[in-house]
Amino acid sequence: MERRLTAILAADVVGYSTLMGEDEVGTLERLKSCRRELIDPSIKEFRGRMVKLMGDGALVEFASVVDAVQCAAAIQRRMAARDQGPYGPRHIRFRIGVNLGDVIVEENDLYGDGVNIAARLEAMAEPGGVCISGTAFDHAVHKVDVGFASLGEQRLKNIADPIRAYRLLLDPAAAGKVVAAPHWPRSRILILASVAALVVAVLAGMFAWQKLSLPSRPSVAVLPFANLDGDQGQDYFVNGITEDLITDLTKLSGLDVIARNSVFAYKDKPAAVADVARDLGVRFVVTGSVRRTGDQIRLNAQLIDAATGDNLWANRFDRGMAGVFAIQDEMSGEIAKALGIRASAAESERMARPPTENLEAYDFYLRAEQTARTGRRNGLREALTLYDKAEQLDPAFAEAFAADASMTVYIWRESFNDIMQSAPARKRAYEKASRALQLDPDLSSPYAILGIMQVVDRRYEEAIASVERAVALGPGDAETQIALGYVQLFAGNHAEAAEAVETALRLDPNLSPINRQIAGLVFLIQGSNDKAIEALERTRNDAPSVGDFTITLGAAYARAGRLQDARAAVSEGMGAMSTPGFDSLSAYRLNGAQYRSPQDLALIIDALQQAGLPEWPFAFTGDEQNRLKGKEIASLVLGHTLQGKLEPGLQPAFLQIGSDGKAAFRSTTRLVTETVRLDGDLLCELSENMFGRPDCGPVYKRRDDAVNGYSFVNSSKVFHFTVVQ
């Protein structure tokens, strides 16, 4: 692995999705023209190397940080002169970030904190501006014809230490100037620190009676808005207003926002604000109501300080349906202001951006979201259809494509093959996520989805980069934090994975069972057995019918030395399985192939062995004396049709195998085209299911009702068959 110190320039187009929505062809032409006539020549002039283009952004490497800063200043000055043309509000404008740092080099691409810091600084820059790191400033100051304004130390998402940041002053009159941040003598800092400590102690005593554990920065829970229309059929619309407000507030990097899953536990349940704040660990609570009458909306909302009971902000909005997005923008902006949070230019723009101009498409999208959240199989099928309708009505509706991708990747991860087979689900998730990012590169969820799929493909560095981008765009979103934990878990970065799931649990104390299982696995591999058991017991209790949740709990019990509880949990989990899933060690080995560290997978397998999980589905065992060798298997199955029955229930099934190994498997519930091959003494099936991995197992000769026959077993089936001559 090659590492080097280099200067990185990260650039991004301001308001790209809005420009594309207004004039897709014209925007692309103007962007290409900018690159051809201005960006590329500037990079060449200052001896930069284009690392990669990312839709509306670029990553450029320079051997000299002075060249990088000069290039950034030249681009922005030339863009400003170019903006005096005829396009008005549809001008192309860039934000640029520059950093000098250590990077990892892999196949001409760059990774690591050196790149991440440049991207974070770019997001801090004003439209048409440049933001650079302290390391870049130290080398470029007095060597470039610009001024510098200190922004002080900045906490950047997922960067361990604070980073000094500076804004370039591009006005020629400011060249050579350095506007310093305020500096306080150390003695004054110590005095203030002592006073602050005393104040904290006093406040802790004052509020101890309320038992409120308040976080160190602003935190808010948006409770489900009440539907005053009296028509339960409008719940999806009212819920959508709540969810959109939560989504907007999560875009503020200075605010913790409790996730939808936790706050909706309070829907239609009267609760005191102080109790809600205590249970969710927040300082502020938003409540509200919506009445929709025909094409008119009346929305009331208020922001309450749970510690004092004071109403910090309240407003009523009366608009037509066409103004629903303007209401959401105003409401999120006013709440942020009341909390004393100053949104960056990028954050303000993302919050102000309407998801769609097509109200009918928005309606289908909200219905899809409501239906998908039921978790029922028929609900997931219906939601796919509703997302399709929203996308057809507005092909530029990025959030609909993103939500579609999110649900589809859930179907894929859970192997809900009766809804959609693995291969088409994978294809759909990739296509929808990619389309969402093409339409709006500032959405966080598609990056999280891509990260999950990339880590399953063992593309670890790409996966980490994707989920870190997701967290940078949605720092207060529990789903992106869980995606980060999921990716870091399989990449072998245990501390980073634990930090991410702890953040997710803070943002969403009522994580969904599948996400809480991820948290449990992270704690299990990290060695925090008590935390793992707590998370996985909650998962088992919330979804007792999902057998693999209970089996994973058995592994945690085994790691804690509670073998009796471990065996009981595994037995209970296997009893809940109606089809092969995670009811065997072979299934865990196959599905755990994405662990970068073999030791991580071995730890889980060892715990499950101690807990009594069998090697094969449905506790199948074969007589090793009757196990066939590879040559025997080849002569038996290649070019033949195998007819038999599947466990459980002995449903009829056929496996037709050509002499070249091309095969088709059919049962009453499955039709799979695949390739069959031999691996030593194992017969392997390779299809687009099971994440494209070969599923291998032994073949045994048996005698059944005086008829010679055979049994083939792997992680997905137990197939008793005879050969049709």
Image (spheres, helix red, strand yellow):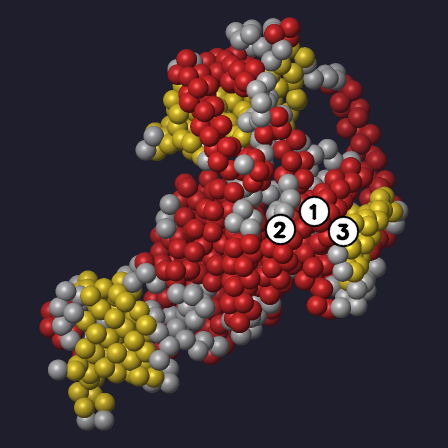
Q: Which amino acid, by three-letter code, is at mark 3?
A: Gly
Disc sitting over residue 358 in the figure: 2
Mark 2 or mark 3: whose residue is earlier in sequence = 3
Circle 1 SS class: helix
In which image quadrant can residue 624 be found? bottom left
Mark 1 or mark 2: whose residue is earlier in sequence = 1
Residue 107, percent across and down?
32, 33
Q: Nearer the viewer, residue 479 or 513?
A: 479
**What is the C-alpha distance between the residues marked 3 and 1?**
10 Å
> How crowded is the residue under tag 3: few (<14 C-alpha within 10 Å), some, or many (20+)?
some
- Which residue extends farthest bottom? 705
**What is the C-alpha distance between the residues marked 2 and 3?**
14 Å
Residue 177, percent across and down?
64, 8
> How crowded is the residue under tag 2: few (<14 C-alpha within 10 Å), some, or many (20+)?
some
Q: Which of 598 and 361 is in front in this view?
A: 361
Q: Which of marks 1 and 2 is in front?
A: 2
The residue beneath circle 1 is: 325
* Residue drawn at 17 percent across, 87 percent down: 708
Circle 3 SS class: strand
Q: Which of 708 and 47 is in front in this view?
A: 47
Describe residue 71's horizontal placement relative to residue 588 as left or right: right
* Residue drawn at 41 percent across, 68 percent down: 417
